[in-house]
Structures are given as structure tokens and as C-alpha cells.
Amino acid sequence: MLIGSGVMQIVFDIGGTSFRHAKYVNGEMVACAKVPTPNYLQGHTPVEINQLLLEGINQAIGSDLASITKVGICYAGPVSEQGKILGSPTIHGIKLEQPFDLKAAVQSLTGIQDVWVTNDLSAAAYRYVDDYSSFELITVSTSVGNKIVINGQLQLGSEGFEGELGHQPACLPAPFGELISVACTCGTGVNHIGSISSGRGIAEVAQQLCSGGLETLYLASSLKGRDSFTTEEITLAAAQGDEFSQRVLDVCTYPLAYAICLTLTSLYLEKVILIGGVVLNSASYFDSLMKNILEIGVYNYTAEHLREKIILGFNDDDSGLIGMHCFLENQWDSYK
């Protein structure tokens, strides 16, 4: 059904968990919806996933096709400057053998030529560019990703591989590097930042440490006797003072804390902004992360400086959608 009248844009956020879209008319969001993202865990091949993504885009556009002037799409993985997606560990499960030209496919499908495709966190960064000139945006959800903006410019290369912080091998405090082994979804190793510090990582690390490393705390824990854990259970128990869960979080947030400290040592940034369901919905996760950051420390930074510099972003799931719209409104002419 046609929504209102005027200049319409549609934006998509294709995340590892949810496939979101929103329609804007004259700069105002008038519709927003989400469905599960098709992915390899559902048994789909990369070719099938690509087709399902196109079908989802076409269905979301619906009867408003004639009114839409621009399409913005952000995707949870590397995207080339030509709008080709290169594969996502959480969606395709692999780096694609051949990049999928999502931009050209959407242009062909819809007849709309003003289509922009970029990484999901790149899009989200545009939500914050009017507030800060130089910052790092980090998401903690299904995995971990980041983007850096310097003097208002997003730092990206032509192939779009920048911002894959989650696939850097994790620095773990002794002796946990020898007690934990969590495979990364990228398929190239174990104990990467994203496989430890993410929502998926927390549940897996808790499972491994309850029988080794933290067994004594586990036997005294409110979670004793559980066959498996969810991230929500661990973060809630930690907030309620459960020592086992608090220690699990301290182990899991350490790799991300270490990476943030390295970045702040290397670059001047006004802010490090944290988004994503895990950190936004769990004060215990953020508290653990800050505890580790303060213990690791950054040269010449006081605790007060670090607390002011490292902040939470907007507490919603819409950063990719809103950032994508901001890009179409304010940055489009510079990139098209």
C-alpha cells in the first residue's frame, strides 16, 4: 500500500540476525519493519541467500516502487566501493568466491538507479558525524565490528575490509588463553575478538569455564546445574552479583577492552561509541568492559578521561537505518 506522498527513500539494514527496512517520506520515517535474515545456519547456500535478500528487498518495496527515488542498503560484512558484497561470517558463513554485485542486482530488479550499498557499521557511523569529528564506533552483538571516522571522513579502502575488528586474534588474560577455545565464524582460527567478546562468545565461554578455570565459582553460582547458558542469563546473573557470571564477563570483555586501549594509544579520538544489543541492553557488560579498560589503562589518560571518552550510543536497533538515511540526505552527492 502506498504510504503518503512526496519524496520517498527506502533503506535496509541487513544484519547477522535481523533484516530491517524503513521508508522515509520528505525526510521523516513513516514505516519500519524487520524479519530474520536468511543465513547459512538455516541451510541456505550463498546463491540462495543472495536470491532471498533480493526477494526481501523487493517485498519491502512493494507497491511503493513508483514513489521511491533512492535505495540505501547496509550489509554486515565487507562491501566494495562499487557496491559488491564480499561475504559475511554471520550471513554467508564464508568469504564469497565471487563478489555479489548487490547494487547492480537491485538496480536491475527495481529499475531504480540511485542505489547505494555499504557496510552496516559504515552506515551507522553517519548517525554520529554531526556530533563528533573523530570517533570510533564499535558494535557488540552477534559479532564485533568497528569503524573509525577522522575529521569527519570515514576511513575505508576500495575493497571495504576496514572495520573487521572482530576477526583480530584476542588478547586474553592468563591463564584463560589456554583454557578457552572458541572457533570464529570467519573460519580462520579460534579466540578472535568477535568469538570471545560477542553475545555468542559469552555463552560459549561460560560453557567452557564452568568445568575448567572457574569451576569453583560455578559450583557456588545461581546458574549451577545448567546444561547450557544464554548471554542474557549470564549478564543478568552478573548484574545480580553472581561471581561466576561476573568473572565470565571480565574474561570475555578483556579482548575488546585491550583493543580499545590500543586504538586510543594510537589515535586521537573524541569518543569511542558502543552500540549493539549486547552492550546497550546490559549494564553489567559495559561495567565489565570499563573495569578492564581502566585496569589496562591508556598512557596519559586518567580514569576520568576514559570514562568521558568511552560512551554508549543511541539505545535502539535503528543506527544502520538512520545512518543510511543520513548518508542519502547529506553525503550522497560526494560519493555517487
Image (cartoon, helix red, strand yellow):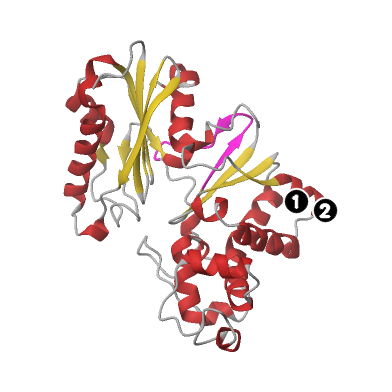
| Amino acid type at mark 2 | Thr
Instruction: Kindly identify which residue carries mark 2.
Output: 302
Q: CA distance from mark 1 to mark 2?
A: 6 Å
The picture places residue 27, in percent across and down from the top left corner, at: 45, 18
Vertical comparison of 76 with 201: above or below: above
Q: Which is more toward the observer, 104 or 201? A: 201
The picture places residue 177, in percent across and down from the top left corner, at: 55, 77
Specify the quadrant that holds the N terminus.
top left
Q: Report if residue 149 lies within the magenta region.
A: yes
Residue 191, visible in the rendered structure: no
| Residue at the image position 36 percent from the left and 12 percent from the top | 7
Q: Which is more toward the observer, 4 or 19? A: 4
- Span shown in magenta: 146-159
| Amino acid type at mark 1 | Leu
Q: Quadrant of residue 159?
A: top left
The picture places residue 114, in percent across and down from the top left corner, at: 32, 20
The picture places residue 155, in percent across and down from the top left corner, at: 53, 37
Vertical comparison of 175 with 115: above or below: below
Q: Quadrant of residue 188?
A: bottom left
Residue 326, visible in the rendered structure: yes
Please tell me whether mark 1 sits on a helix, a strand or a loop: helix
Instruction: Kindly identify which residue carries mark 1.
Output: 306
Neighbours of disc 1 within 10 Å: few (<14), some (14-19), many (20+): some
Specify the quadrant that holds the C terminus.
top left
Q: Report if residue 179 lies within the magenta region.
A: no
